């Protein structure tokens, strides 16, 4: 007789779905503002916000607005901000990336001065600072011009130390060079920044969903693509190798990027590592949601919260999203 008890009509899953209170009681995944991270673009060459056409609602900001944005983010209770810089000058070596008075260092310093509690992260990569738009310095190989891994790692280590000195709580290398997490950890520790956290863009795919970001950060590669250093979207086992290497090199937090087309990868990395896991819902994901909402094809707020919930359900502890402030307002309402 036990057998009959296992199915319908004894079992009715709709019982637990009958009211909002019941649904809340059995909800498995919840979103909290404290786990949302807002990406920000600081442009050294502007005095007022400059809207990014491919990302309606997002603007490049002047460094002079950093303190105000920090106070706003802190008031909303979001988990942090991550800073990208647009310098006035670019060259082949990305020299302006190592300028202690560059837009990221200045914005970090004024944000930390404005708010004690807000977690400030910086993206560490030279693509915004190179005139060719690649994530490292180039060298000639038999195959042609390629990004020179080890020379790039040196620059990234210097950048990381500058950001830490400016006050960054978390350094987030996004370049996909081999060995950069270990090198950055050594450089930070050598300068006394033993408490500076490394959030590694450990699993970063060569994705078409970065399209709008390249306008936002003015960093589209001038030739070729990033497939020689970013991961092939077809690979999931390789993600576990990337994650394990970065964990061994001393990463404190791992990241999978993009998020929405890689929910399986988020789930796999979650299962294979005990480290906190971030997922980056990238510019193309933002643009798709905004475009569909503008066309009246989806209900904006519901769709955005559904996407964020899916990313958490897949296993991310925290989400980098351009919707962080608005989502936090909805969640706090
Ligand atoms: C590289 C970097 C990129 C993004 C974050 N860091 C662009 C790229 O690799 O081409 C993409 C973020 C987004 O699309 O929202 N510095």
Image (cartoon, rainbow, N blue to C red):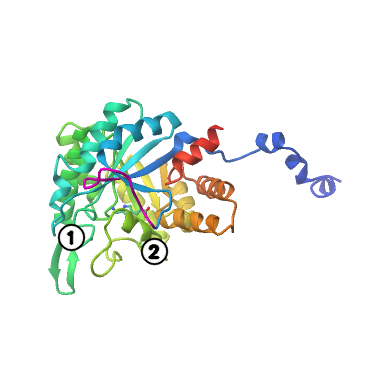
Instruction: Tell me the distance, in whole angstroms, between the alpha carbons under discs 2 and 1.
Output: 21 Å
Query: In the current view of this chain or complex, which residue is farthest to the front?
Result: 48
| Residue for badge 1 | 131
In the depicted view, which residue is nearer to us: 177 or 68? 68
Return the disc, 2 or 1, that comes first in the chain's sequence: 1
Q: Is residue 10 left or right of residue 27?
A: right
Residue at 18% across / 60% down in the picture? 131
Q: Which residues are magenta?
A: 41-53
Number of numbered discs visible in the structure rendering: 2
Element type where label 2 sits in the image? helix
Other-residue count near label 1 (Cα within 10 Å), few / some / many at <14 / 14–19 / ≥20 = some
- Residue 265 makes an appearance in the image: no
Tell me residue 184's x, y (percent): 21, 43
Numbered label attached to residue 208? 2
Disc 1 residue lies near ligand 1 with CB under 8 A: no
Q: Is residue 8 left or right of residue 191?
A: right
Numbered label attached to residue 158? none
- Residue 47 makes an appearance in the image: yes
Q: Is residue 65 left or right of residue 2?
A: left
Tell me residue 298's x, y (percent): 59, 55
């Amino acid at each position: 007789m036990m057998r009959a008890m296992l199915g319908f009509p004894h079992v009715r899953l709709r019982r637990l779905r009958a009211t909002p209170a019941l649904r809340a009681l059995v909800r498995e995944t919840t979103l909290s503002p404290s786990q949302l991270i807002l990406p920000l673009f600081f442009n050294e060459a502007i005095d007022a916000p400059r809207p990014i056409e491919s990302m309606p609602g997002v603007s490049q900001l002047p460094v002079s607005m950093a303190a105000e944005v920090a106070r706003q983010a802190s008031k909303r209770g979001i988990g942090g901000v991550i800073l990208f810089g647009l310098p006035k000058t670019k060259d082949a070596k990305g020299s302006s990336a190592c300028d202690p008075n560059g837009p990221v260092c200045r914005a970090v310093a004024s944000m930390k001065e404005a708010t004690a509690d807000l977690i400030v992260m910086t993206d560490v990569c030279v693509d915004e600072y190179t005139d060719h738009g690649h994530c490292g310095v180039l060298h000639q190989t038999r195959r042609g011009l390629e990004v020179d891994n080890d020379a790039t790692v040196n620059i990234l280590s210097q950048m990381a130390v500058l950001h830490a000195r400016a006050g960054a709580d978390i350094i987030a290398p996004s370049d996909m060079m081999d060995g950069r997490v270990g090198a950055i950890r050594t450089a930070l520790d050598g300068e006394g920044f033993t408490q500076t956290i490394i959030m590694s863009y450990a699993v970063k795919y060569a994705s078409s969903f970065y399209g709008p970001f390249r306008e936002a950060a003015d960093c589209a590669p001038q030739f070729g693509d990033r497939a020689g250093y970013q991961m092939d979207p077809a690979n999931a086992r390789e993600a576990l190798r990337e994650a394990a290497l970065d964990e061994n090199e001393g990463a404190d937090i791992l990241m999978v990027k993009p998020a929405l087309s890689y929910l399986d990868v988020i789930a796999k990395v979650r299962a294979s590592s005990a480290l906190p896991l971030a997922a980056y819902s990238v510019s193309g994901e933002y643009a798709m949601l905004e475009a569909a909402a503008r066309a009246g094809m989806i209900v904006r707020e519901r769709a955005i919260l559904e996407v964020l919930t899916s990313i958490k359900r897949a296993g991310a502890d925290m989400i980098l999203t351009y919707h962080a402030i608005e989502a936090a307002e909805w969640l706090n309402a």
